Amino acid sequence: ILNVEQSPQSLHVQEGDSTNFTCSFPSSNFYALHWYRWETAKSPEALFVMTLNGDEKKKGRISATLNTKEGYSYLYIKGSQPEDSATYLCAFTRGSTLGRLYFGRGTQLTVWP
Amino acid sequence: DVKVTQSSRYLVKRTGEKVFLECVQDMDHENMFWYRQDPGLGLRLIYFSYDVKMKEKGDIPEGYSVSREKKERFSLILESASTNQTSMYLCASSSRGSFYSNQPQHFGDGTRLSIL
């Protein structure tokens, strides 16, 4: 079982604050890094899939960066809104197991109005 | 939009029963996955399948089996349900994509299974 670490485990911020979380993964045999958002009572939804070192992806107020050499990715949310409240999951794919994801335990974000 | 449909949102069964959880996807995806999610433990892979009649064990296959007779359907079977299998079960699918790309997984809404 590969170790994918996410920090912090939970985060409470005020509406309008910007925030970021970290995902750490094994840097050897890297293939891709995924970010998902999982809102309560809904299914996890893919945010980004990143494959190249130095990749930066953006979707509205959410962006992500990737460093495959040192094995980490950051997810940033600019100007958090209550609707951003969710668990954010990262997952890692190795080159030898195309399609299979190894998930971290997630960062639970709560944005207070 | 990709649709992954799980047969039940909530299910209550008794210890020792054989339980079937069904998952259907409508996007002709090659890959299908079954996870369970427990508080503090994140998503753990039970079984996955790359093709019809093909299955691979994930990290926690004990007490489970799967069936993939048709490309769109992937069933999870609890051979003899036990209380420690009370959990949220999620099905997902993804396309195989090219060798140099990687495709996101699309998830169903989950089945909250309680074993009494």
Image (spheres, rainbow, N blue to C red):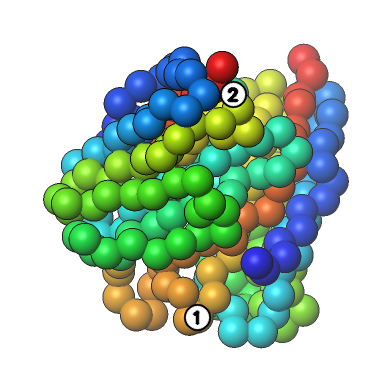
- Residue at the spot x=71%, y=43% of the render? B41
Q: Are marks 2 and 1 in contact (CB under 8 Å)?
A: no
The residue at the far left in this view is B70
Q: Secondary structure at mark 2?
A: loop
For residue B29, what is the image quadrant? bottom left
Q: Quadrant of residue B9?
A: top left
- Amino acid type of the residue tagged 1 in the rendering: Gly
Instruction: Please state, as top left, top right, bottom left or bottom right, where the N terminus of chain A lies in the image.
Output: bottom right
Up the image or down, B99 lies above or below A112; here it is below
**Residue A62 in view here:** no
Nearest to the observer: residue B108 or residue B60? B60
What residue would you read off at disc 2? A40
- Chain letter for mark 1: A
The residue where tag 1 is placed is A95
Q: Quadrant of the C terminus of chain A?
A: top right
Residue B56 location in percent, x, y?
A: 40, 64
Closer to us: B93 or A21: B93
Label 2 and label 1 in one chain: yes
Residue type of the residue flagged with mark 2: Thr
Q: Identify the chain of the residue marked 2, using the numbered disc in the image.
A: A
The number of numbered badges drawn on the structure is 2
Q: Residue A29 placed where, x, y %?
A: 59, 84
Q: Nearer the viewer, residue A49 or A18?
A: A49
Residue A98: x and y, percent? 42, 72
Marks 2 and 1 sit apart, C-alpha to C-alpha, by: 32 Å
Question: Does residue B85 appear to the left or right of B1 in the view shown?
Answer: right
A84 left or right, relative to A98: right
**Disc 2 crowd, CA 10 A, few/some/many (<14, 14-19, 20+):** few
Quadrant of the rendered structure where residue A27 is?
bottom right
Residue ID at (50%, 60%): B58
